[in-house]
Image (cartoon, rainbow, N blue to C red):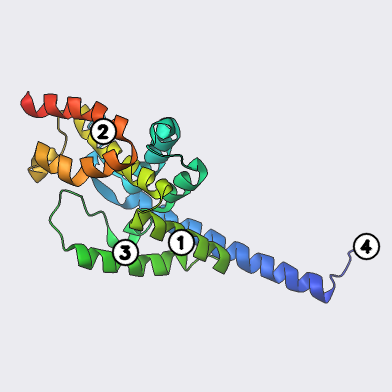
Amino acid sequence: MHRVMTPAESRNETMTQDRLSKQLDFLVEADKLKTVQRANTLCDASRLENSAEHSWHIALYAMILAEHANHPIRIDRVLKMLLIHDLVEIDAGDNPIHGDHDVAAVEAIEQAAADRIFGLLPADQRDSFRDLWEEFEATETDDAIFAKSIDRVQPVICNLETDGGTWPDYNVTREQLESRVGVKVDRGASSVWRHLKARISAHFNG
């Protein structure tokens, strides 16, 4: 015999279904990140990378390279930051670090995108994810500093693996790499940047 839910159980069921609907709506929206092309290619140069692939790959980078962080980190928080940090590109698109764009305008678009995209989630997850995203963007905590350094490392390696990859398209110089990328990587993982500098020098001197 089917038991009729009490009013309290019915309310709880409705709340659960509403929460689940919001979570699934967010996950479906996140699928759009797979359509956002980035400026660098895959390591085999077969095609351009997309932002969802980038997010997965740098999460893996962080897991493998965590021991090289300059300061103690909580890898669980770093991974969360890296998995969500580029979701705003669904609305804002990819803005290459070596590209020419209005930084203030991009930041405004990304803030609006964060409002919309994280706003799809239930309030507690909305606020938690938004706080992590803001922490990553501010880059002041040890977790965020390391996360940002890893975010900058992966494209460098993709370009080194493809004999400069898309660097020539943006007229990238060794000095530009140092000022726009190296400073951020060195701040979070100095030993990783020291290792890469030798390969970068060999590339530009070759």
Labels 4 and 3: the sequence-earlier one: 4
- Depth check, mark 2 against mark 3: the one in front is 2
Residue 193, disc: 2
Could you tell me how far apart the alpha carbons at marks 1 and 4 are, in whole angstroms?
Answer: 47 Å
Q: Earlier in the sequence, mark 1 or mark 3?
A: 3
Disc nearer the start of the sequence (2/3)? 3
Q: Quadrant of residue 175?
A: top left
Label 2 Cα crowd, 10 Å radius (few <14 / some 14-19 / many 20+)? many
Is residue 160 rendered to the left or right of residue 52? left
Q: Which residue is mark 3?
A: 110
Q: Nearer the viewer, mark 1 or mark 2?
A: 2
How far is the residue under mark 4 from the one under mark 3?
53 Å
Q: Is residue 2 left or right of residue 172?
A: right
Q: Identify the amino acid type marked 3.
A: Glu
Question: Residue at 28% across / 37% down in the picture?
Answer: 153
- SS for callout 1: helix
Q: Name the amino acid type tagged 4.
A: Met
Contact? badges 1 and 4 (CB < 8 Å)? no
| Residue 69 percent location from the top left of the image | 39, 36
Cα separation between marks 2 and 3: 28 Å
Asked if 89 appears above or below 64 in the picture, the reply is: below
The front one of 104 and 90 is 104
Calculate the distance from the C-alpha at mark 1 to the C-alpha at mark 2. 28 Å
Q: Residues within 10 Å of mark 1 (few under 14, many from 20)?
A: few
Mark sitting earlier along the chain (2/4) = 4
Q: Which residue is mark 1?
A: 131
Gap between marks 1 and 3 measured at Cα = 14 Å
Asked whether disc 1 touches disc 2, contact meaning CB atoms under 8 Å apart, the reply is no
Q: Is residue 93 visible?
A: yes
Vertical arrangement, residue 33 with respect to residue 153, above or below: below
The N terminus - image quarter: bottom right
